[in-house]
Amino acid sequence: MKDGLWLDDASFRYGDLWVLRETELHVPPGRTLIVTGDNGVGKSTLLYVCAGLLPVTAGHVWLDGHLPAAKKPSELMRQGVRRGFLFGQGGLLSNLSALANVTLALRYHADVFGIDDKEVDARAREALAQLRVAQTDFHALPAHLSVGVRKRVALARALALDPNFVFLDDPDAGLDSATRHLVYERLERFRDDSHITVIIATNSRPLIDRLGVHPMELAHGHLLPEDETRRSRRA
Amino acid sequence: MRSTLPYDPRSDVFREAGWVGRVGRRAINGLSQTWALWGTLKDAILSDLAPGVAARRLVHSIMLTQVMFTGVQALSLVSVIGLLIGASIIIQTNMMVPADGELIGRVLVAVVLRELAPLITAIVVAGRSGTAIATELGNMKVNAEVLALSSLGVDPLRYVVLPRMVGCVVSVVALMIYFSIVSLSAAFALGVLSSGASLSSFQQGVSGSVMPHDLALFFCKGVGLGTIVGWLSCHFGLEVKSSPTEVPQQASRAVVMSLLGCVVYNTALTAGFYWLVGPPLPAP
């Protein structure tokens, strides 16, 4: 059984631009992978590929032994792969309120989670409260929320699913100091959870230092420990 | 499987190599677009059979909302168009066969019930809701909402496409019936007032020329045209990749292709149907 995230000889390219070349990677449950890299190198794309939202050009991506790109999203959920994804930009459904965004997946999979409408609502409210989203914002559309609140709602949506994979794209970008610390606290809990595989794409040094995880750098389609990339650049 | 991705690397595996390569690539692109078009329809319909009681309940509630947006909110527009179409037909027929209520009734059945009601209703739904659907789905693609749905384990075709397609089918059929009633009523009223023909002669003309197989044709047209509008609007909306500038382009493409599809389907069905069952109007 391939627990956690496995990249098996995985490659991905946009036209002539290689984002990932024949990469082997294993991130077991309970481990956190931080990916850094220059702007435009493909960090967000790497997250999409790892989450199975984009199919690889060659090779395979496994999430807990399942090939996500070959299955319908709901099939994956039914087989126990619960993905929480925080998008760098967008990602919240613009025609649903903050609360409805959080309840959506719970309602859609209420039979999988074994919960009724009341429990769905309670679970969503609890997740929003944990991220300190004000009750007055519960029924607001994402367009009427500030960047910080939107990010917290998106994180609450991921949290409410009780995920075993968390993918975070620039989780602290555009946040004020208080919100950033709140997000860091939440990410530390994800990091310390032995059942969750966490993948973060960021260049934020405070976040990397706070999580205390040695990052890997994505450059020219290769994922290498940051020090090694720097050495090869100097060479 | 129909792709709902912002970028599909499988579409970029062929490199151009001279004119042979370009022709080949165009042919392959054409085939893959046709395949994707078919995939949208097939996968959306089959998605309703996927497991998930809660998902089905949620999707069915969205279908009702969609019928409200597409059908109920279009009633006033369809009323006005039905009224005016009925009036203009009666003006024309009055000039050709004044005071012949029975013949005018027959013409109304042939023109309104068999042809205009399905086609005009589909055109109204395509213009009003088709653009809205394509724009909404295009914006969802740009804002990564479709990817977000996948990440949450929600099937985009089941949650986004199926309710809109069903909404269009139900709305087109219901609006066709409503359009026919409004249009025929307007024509009767204006005909009686302007030509002096009796209401009973109109009724005789209508009831004498409506055949049982007209009902089958009427519903085949409604279901088919509704499917075409919902399907093509959703498909072209999802064809937006990642730039907001693609949204109006695809919305316009969705409406143009829907209108073309509706006219072709309507004509083909009329021709095929009467070729099979024989002429609709018995000799007077």
Image (spheres, grey):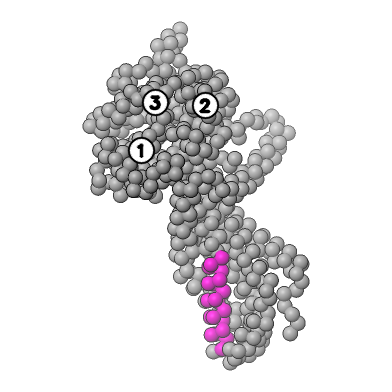
The subunit carrying tag 3 is: A
SS label for mark 3? loop
Task: Please say whether residue A231 is one of the residues in the magenta stretch.
Answer: no
* Horizontal side of residue A172 vs B222, given as left or right: left
Residue at the spot of label 2:
A65
Residue in the picture at 38% in, 18% down: A215
* Horizontal side of residue A30 vs A12, given as left or right: left
Residue at the spot of label 3:
A195
Residue at the spot of label 1:
A160
The subunit carrying tag 2 is: A
The kind of residue on which mark 1 rests is Ala
* Cα separation between marks 3 and 1: 15 Å
SS label for mark 1? helix
The kind of residue on which mark 3 rests is His
* Cα separation between marks 1 and 2: 23 Å
Residue at the far front in the pictured view: A114
Q: Residues within 10 Å of mark 3 (few under 14, many from 20)?
A: some
Among the two numbered marks 3 and 1 on one chain, the one whose residue lies closer to the N terminus? 1
The subunit carrying tag 1 is: A
Asked whether the residues under marks 3 and 1 belong to the same chain, the reply is: yes
Q: Which of A64 and B115 lies nearest the eye of the viewer?
A: A64
Quarter of the image containing the N terminus of chain B?
top right
* Closer mark to the observer between disc 3 and disc 1: 3
Q: Which of B272 and B9 lies nearest the eye of the viewer?
A: B272
**Taking B58 as reference, is A22 above or below it?**
above
The residues colored magenta run B173-192
Residue in the picture at 42% in, 23% down: A29
